[in-house]
Each structure stands twice: as C-alpha cells, then as structure tokens.
Image: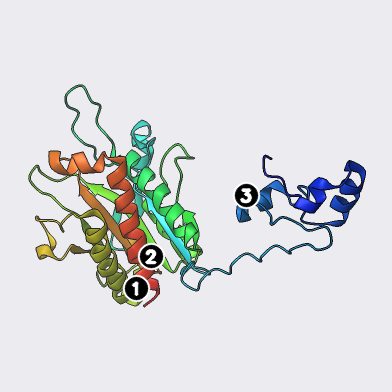
Amino acid sequence: MPYDHRSPVTRRLPAALAALLCSAALAGCGASSEAAQGARGPAPAATATTTTPAAPAPSPTPDAQPLAGRTIVVDPGHNPGNFRHTREINQKVDIGTGLKECDTTGTSTNASGGKAAYTEAAFTLDVSHRLRDLLEARGATVVLTHDADRPYGPCIDERARTGNGAEADAVVSVHADGSAQGNRGFHVIVPTKVKKGSADTGPIVAPSRTLGERIAAAFGRATGTAPANYLGDGTGLDVRSDLGGLNLSTVPKVFVECGNMRDPKDAALLTSGAWRQKAAQGIADGIVTYLQG
C-alpha cells in the first residue's frame, strides 16, 4: 500500500534493524490485515518502542436492527412460470369457505409503443427481493414463499402454510392490481372474520388490520402515492373473505396491491425501478412500526 506505516525513527534506521523492529511492532510495517485497514482506515504510525492498539469496532445502536429475532414471510404474488402451467394452477384447493383455483397468472401492464407488457409476477418478485434485503438489513429472518425456483405456484393454501409453519411475526403478500383505467392508487387487503372448515381468522383479524394500517401509512409516505380511488373509501384498506391466503393463515397477514397495472399513470410508476425501491421501503417501514408497537 502507498501509506508508510513506519515511524520517522524507523525510516532512519538501517534496513536490518528496521525489519527487527517491524516484527516486534504489531501495528507497524503493514502488519494490520488489508481487511482491517479497509474497515478502520490506515493504522496509526508506530514508534520504535510502542504500538497503538486498534480501536474496537463501534457497537451497533439499539435501533440499528429493530427486527432482530423476528421472522417475516414475504409472498411474491403469482409465479413467472404460471402461464405455462394453466392446467395445474386451475386445480381447485380448499380455502375453508369453499374451493378456489390453486393460483393465477396475475395481471400485467398494457404493451404499447413497442414495449412489452410488464407482468405482475415479474413486478412482485422484484419488489419482494428489495423488501427482503431491507428487512434482513434490519435484523429480520426473511422467508420467501417462492423465488421463481419452481415451475409454477405455490398454490394459495401452500403459501398460507409457509407463513404458519414459520410462525411468522408478519406475512406480506406483494401484488399489483388489474383494474380499469382511471382507477389509481394502492391498497392493503386485510382479512375479515371467517370461521368455516379449515379457516378460522378470528385470532388474526385485529393484528392483521393493524399491520395493514401501518403499511398503508408508510407506503403512502415512501412512494408519494395516494390510497386507491376506487375502493376502501380513501383508507387504503380493503376487507375480504374470499382469499385463501388470508383465510388459511394463523399468523398476521396482509396483501399489498401496490398500484393498478392497467392504468397508464400507475403503470409508469410500477415499471420504474426507483419507484419499486420506494414501494419496498414503504412496506418495510410499515412492518417495523407494526412490530415495534
């Protein structure tokens, strides 16, 4: 390295004596590892008789990892391969209140101006990756229900089982809507009370709503977008009883519909990597405020 770690005294000594001194001085003559120098900067210059011990690394502040010890399941809506497996994803599964398709292909933006459509499956996977990274940086253990590492699915009942089996502190399913043009904004879907068959959402209705409220508030702040103008009466919340991923969950869970892919103005946001990072940030912030009470 260009920095000369020897003291002025050492540089004036004959080479043999300088080498002897360097071997005795732990911080001199490049004895510090390159990794340590990268973390702390160049080591202090040594004298011929003393060494300066490296300063200990600063301890993380209590707020540096607010999610340490927490488990969060992130559920990327749909799967990029679903369209190749329509027979499989159309198979019905039990969601407690009845039977519903295993999964769907999801929606997409409209192809225009020579640009291909941007699929919801691609969008949700990208946002989920960004969200995972943000949550892990805050100390959380993050489980993805899938990572496009399987041909299709998982089915909606399996997605619920993933969150239940992980005993997650929170589960967030990432989506984008496919509503009519002119319908804009985000909304968070929360469960209503359902008790039928294998579905019993009673214990999770209240915490899931709180999770949804926290995410809705943080999402709006982070992205600068407004709650949906076509449902939820401006609250950014939508209560549903027909989603297997919610009905079969035994841990707090919500769906985040980040915007409407069929509206050109919303689509311009959803196809922006910079905006998707803001969306992930908003969801992460909402989870933190929920778990911190």
Tell whether label 1 touches label 2 (CB within 8 Å): yes
State the quadrant of the N terminus: top right
Residue at position x 17%, y 44% in the image: 266
Q: Secondary structure at mark 2?
A: loop
Distance CA(mark 1)–CA(mark 3): 47 Å
Q: Amino acid at mark 3?
A: Gly
Q: Amino acid at mark 1?
A: Ile
Viewer-proximal residue among 65 and 40: 40
Q: CA distance from mark 3 to mark 2?
A: 46 Å
Residue 22 spot, x, y in % from top left: 84, 51
Q: Position of residue 225 (x, y in %)?
A: 18, 54
The quarter of the image holding the C terminus is bottom left
Callout 1: few (<14), some (14-19), or many (20+) C-alpha neighbours within 10 Å?
many
Residue that badge 3 annotates: 38
Q: Where is residue 43 shown, x and y percent of the image?
A: 68, 54
Location of mark 2 (residue)? 249
Q: Which x, y percent locates residue 128?
A: 39, 49
Name the residue: 26% across, 73% down: 193
Q: Nearer the viewer, mark 1 or mark 3?
A: 3
Asked which quadrant contains residue 256, the reply is bottom left
